[in-house]
Image: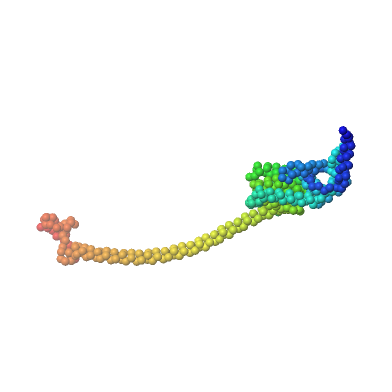
Amino acid sequence: MTSITLSELTEQIQQTIKAGFESPVWIRAEISELRENPGGHCYLELIEKDTDSDTLLAKSKATCWASTYRMLKPYFEGSTGQTLRSGLKVLVAVTVEFHSVYGFSLNLRDIDPTFTLGEMAARRMQIIRQLEADGVVDMNKQLTMPSPVQRLAIISSATAAGYGDFSDQLKNNPSHFVFYTKLFPAIMQGDQAEGSIIKALESIYDHAGMFDAVVIIRGGGATTDLACFDSYELALNCAQFPLPIIAGIGHQRDVSILDMVACISLKTPTAVAEYLNSNMQEVENQILNIFADIRDVVKNKIETDNRQMDQTKVRIKQTLRSWVVQKTHLLDRQKSRLKSNVRLQLLKQNNKLLVLEKSIETYSPAFLLRHGYTITTLHGKRITSANQVKAGDRISTYVHDGEFESQVE
């Protein structure tokens, strides 16, 4: 039985691979690991997964030497707006190498940015379609924005310039509106950004009743820093959040998926502050208009009431005047009737007096004396019987033209 040494076997494998892969080969793969060493070399692990089951189909180490990496990295990032990082699908040209000590490896020589752009666009579209299929893509947009929007939960990096500009513009607004803000710090770029922002949303959820809306802001930066805002999990959390979300991510590229699901999407943190100030101004104008309407209604009511009061006064005066005239006429008639009644009563009483006077005159002593009768008295008392006198009494006798005395015998 013949045999060969291990080095002879590896030498044969090396020659076979070299003969079979004289020129670079373009391969489609996903970057699962990537690291750069201080010398400028880049070491990667490339994988391929089954599209349906996500089962790992192949894996290989790859190297991009510093001389090549210095050119490929800025070329790729400038073309795609993305950093070379794990999770990206790439189309790369590689040479196949085999070393007797280090084994099989790939040497990365070139990269096609358009492939990654297409994969990113496809992935983005896949996320959008998944959100639509989940029925959540418009959920946050359907929330009613409170009026005014004054109590704000803010997700941002505490040291970001965009957050500082946003806060200054809210605090120093020309109308002196007061906003109540609470910062929930989060990492706003890189691989950890997605989880950090979701964690901040969860913290806000625990105190949702304290806020009117959530503001997610990030200042301008490289497009490569903003990939986290195209995340399915982040978009899902934002779309289903119970408070309206206002996104102000400073970028000039296409709208992110977070922008698509947020209740309101604006270009920059400064634009968000302008929107909030404008919202407060609109509310103030509405309140002032309501006050003006109330003032006009009250003024018109007072003027109407005054007119009605004046008219009522006129009617009352007319009524009183008419009443006084009526009562005056009635009083005059009553006075006339009273005078007539008094005159009649006086006349009746006068007639009675005349009758009495006549009766008195008829039966008076003077009347009798004038008609031949006399009156005799004894000691001033009238004598009506002979038994009242005796012999020797001196009596007085009165006739119509005088008196005389006599003595009884």
Front residue of 225 and 76: 76
Can residue 382 be seen in this snapshot? Answer: yes
Q: Horizontal and vertical percent for residue 134?
A: 66, 48
| Residue lying at 77% horizontally and 51% vertically, measured from the top left | 117
Residue at the far top in the pictured view: 1
In this picture, residue 328 sits left or right of residue 10: left
Q: Looking at the figure, which quarter contains the C terminus?
A: bottom left
| Residue lying at 70% horizontally and 47% vertically, measured from the top left | 235
In this picture, residue 299 sits left or right of residue 45: left
**Where on the picture, by quarter, is residue 405?**
bottom left
Front residue of 251 and 273: 251
Can residue 40 be seen in this snapshot? Answer: no
Q: Horizontal and vertical percent for residue 198?
A: 70, 44
**Where on the picture, by quarter, is residue 345?**
bottom left
Q: Horizontal and vertical percent for residue 40?
A: 86, 43
Q: Is residue 192 above or below residue 173?
A: above
Front residue of 345 and 226: 226
The colour scheme is rainbow
| Residue lying at 56% horizontally and 58% vertically, measured from the top left | 298
In this picture, residue 132 sits left or right of residue 20: left
Front residue of 36 and 89: 89
